[in-house]
Amino acid sequence: MASPDIDVRYVADLARLNLSDAEAATFQKQLSDILGYVAQLEKVDVSSVAAFSGPVVNNLRPDVLGESLPVEVALSNAPQQENNLIVVPKMIE
Amino acid sequence: MAEYEAVIGLEVHVQLKTNTKMFCSCKNEFGGAPNSHVCPVCLGMPGVLPTPNEEAIIKTILTGEMLECQIAPRCKFDRKNYFYPDMPKNYQISQYDEPLCANGAVTLNLLAFPKDVQNDPKVNFDKKIRLERIHLEEDVAKSFHYDGASGIDFNRAGTPLMEIVSKADIATPEEAFAYLTALKQILIYGGVSDADMEKGQMRCDVNVSIRPKGQKEYGTKVEIKNLNSISAVRKSLHYEILRQTADVEAGVPIIQQTRRWDDGRGETFMMRTKEKAHDYRYFPDPDLLPLNTEEGLHQTAKSRLPELPAAKKSRLVADYAVTEYQASVLASEVALANYFEKAAANAKNKSAVANFLLNDYFATGGDIENIPVNPEFFSELSNLVEEGKINTKQAKEVFPKMVAENKAPSVLVKELGLSQITDTAALEALCDQAIAANPRSVADFKAGKTNAVNALKGQVMKLSKGQANPQVVGDILLKKLSA
């Protein structure tokens, strides 16, 4: 079942992707197929299954200090750095 | 010219006071060497698994309880997707349609308003500003800007951050000021955050529009950013309301935009227009299970509910017989109220202790966090006055030494050679002396000038080197003169 509910150009724009027309057409079909595949779930009869109301036990972490990375390790993948800051192209707000 | 009214809503971000970050066990601390409190989780490395900090959730629920919110029995975390170098995952973990707390209110109070309007009869000092919601999210990294480049410090990334959204109930810059002051006070009361705006622990974005008075529809709203203090919020709103009014009057339409406050110049500047709404493509974070707050979290938060400012104020009035005003000032800071309760514990006149603390102590330029004085000395000093052992003038001599040297008032009274003469026989002798030496004042008094007794009283005080109890002296003189 094909779903028309996806605008590949718009999604690409949000993701800062520059797609060629051919790529847009390919992804349009692929994404629609995926949505159609997942949409099969909607046909399953779940009337006898209780709705999931959340976990009984919460998966939480106590507020206890753990170890952080040494600065040089934390920065090891940063192509540019200065004064222990990761340097990126100028951000404009 | 039509009359306009402003419609103001505030979004306040508050960093929670926890040991560790929201989803990892890195240290939550202001400052620190750049990128020294980071790990694969808060750096957004692939394949890591965030785990929520229980304490952050409890503190958010506690905030909701203090602000009269409804606490969701169940909530979840969502991903807010956007691209920016301060968020390496390309999404921020936040809460979209199921926030922890909904509704609620901040109740303003007189002292929360700027001092210059505290006597304005037009102001509704007890106004309730309703809240839309409070949700929990993670803070982003801090950026520094240089020529042609920016530098990123991820220490702040992942700090537990509450977003408190008000309804558009705020009508004036002064109400916005009072809202933030009252909110900050409550956050500090609950130990939820230090809420220091200078350290970025509390940050505020403002939405403001104007409309002709009486109109139902809202005007186009403008967002103001870069507000680093509560007074900057007030000043920027004054500026912005005037600017919008002038534009509307001149027929210039207001466009939806974000403006930046320049505190030095006292003006707002346009940063960007909002041509299209942001599309953050929120979806539930598949790394995080929904939360069930009824599993202990809500209960724990409730058990930590402190006595809030309004309740503390009423109790101080009832238990210590201080004035309403004294109680408001004392309750405005939890540390101050706590100190007062210790200081007044053994005092016969507790309102006098409030006076010593609020007037005399603060006049020395001291603050309450670093007050060096044993609180019991306040009781002792006020009791010395109450029992007539020293007079109020002498108390004012003792006070600065008591603060500077943290010495017991009874010791200081001896050291300074103070102590009031209450021995009636001794005082009668002094009064006789003064009467004999000042026939003129005596004659004036007998001629009906009752004020003349003050001159004689002054003489007696002088003869006693200031140690006579002025009230007793007055009584004796009147008795003798009228005889």
Image: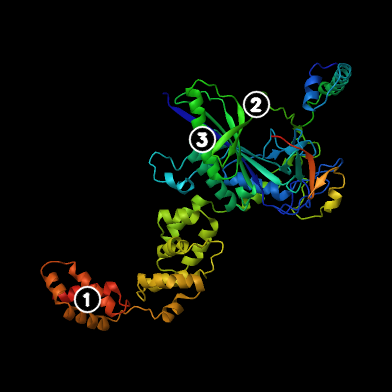
SS state under label 3: helix
Q: Position of residue B261 (x, y in %)?
A: 58, 38
- The relative height of residue B482 versus residue B203 in the rendered view (above or below) is below
Read off the chain for label 1: B
**Which quarter of the rendered picture does the N terminus of chain B lie within?**
top left
Disc 3 designates what residue? B239
Q: Nearer the viewer, residue B237 or B109?
A: B237
Q: Position of residue B347 (x, y in %)?
A: 43, 68
Specify the label residue A70 is tagged with.
none
The disc label shown at residue B476, or none = 1
| Spatial separation of the CA atoms under disc 1 and disc 2 | 82 Å
- Which of the two discs, 3 and 2, labels the residue nearer the N terminus? 3
Q: Nearer the viewer, mark 1 or mark 3?
A: 3
Quadrant where the C terminus of chain B is found in the figure = bottom left
Q: Earlier in the sequence, mark 1 or mark 2?
A: 2
Q: Residues within 10 Å of mark 1 (few under 14, many from 20)?
A: some
Please state which amino acid type lies under the numbered disc 2.
Lys
The numbered mark 3 sits on a residue in which chain? B
User: Which of the 4 quarters of the picture holds residue A89?
Assistant: top right
Element marked by disc 1: helix
Both on one chain, marks 1 and 3? yes
Q: Marks 1 and 2: CB-CB under 8 Å?
A: no
Q: Identify residue type, mark 1.
A: Ile
Q: Vertically, is B1 above or below B187?
A: above
Given residues A48 and B148, the one toward you in this image is B148
Q: Which label's residue is closer to the chain start, 1 or 3? A: 3
Q: Could you say where residue B431 lies in the image, as x and y percent from the top left? A: 22, 79
**Which residue is identified by label 2?**
B274
Q: Nearer the viewer, mark 1 or mark 2?
A: 2
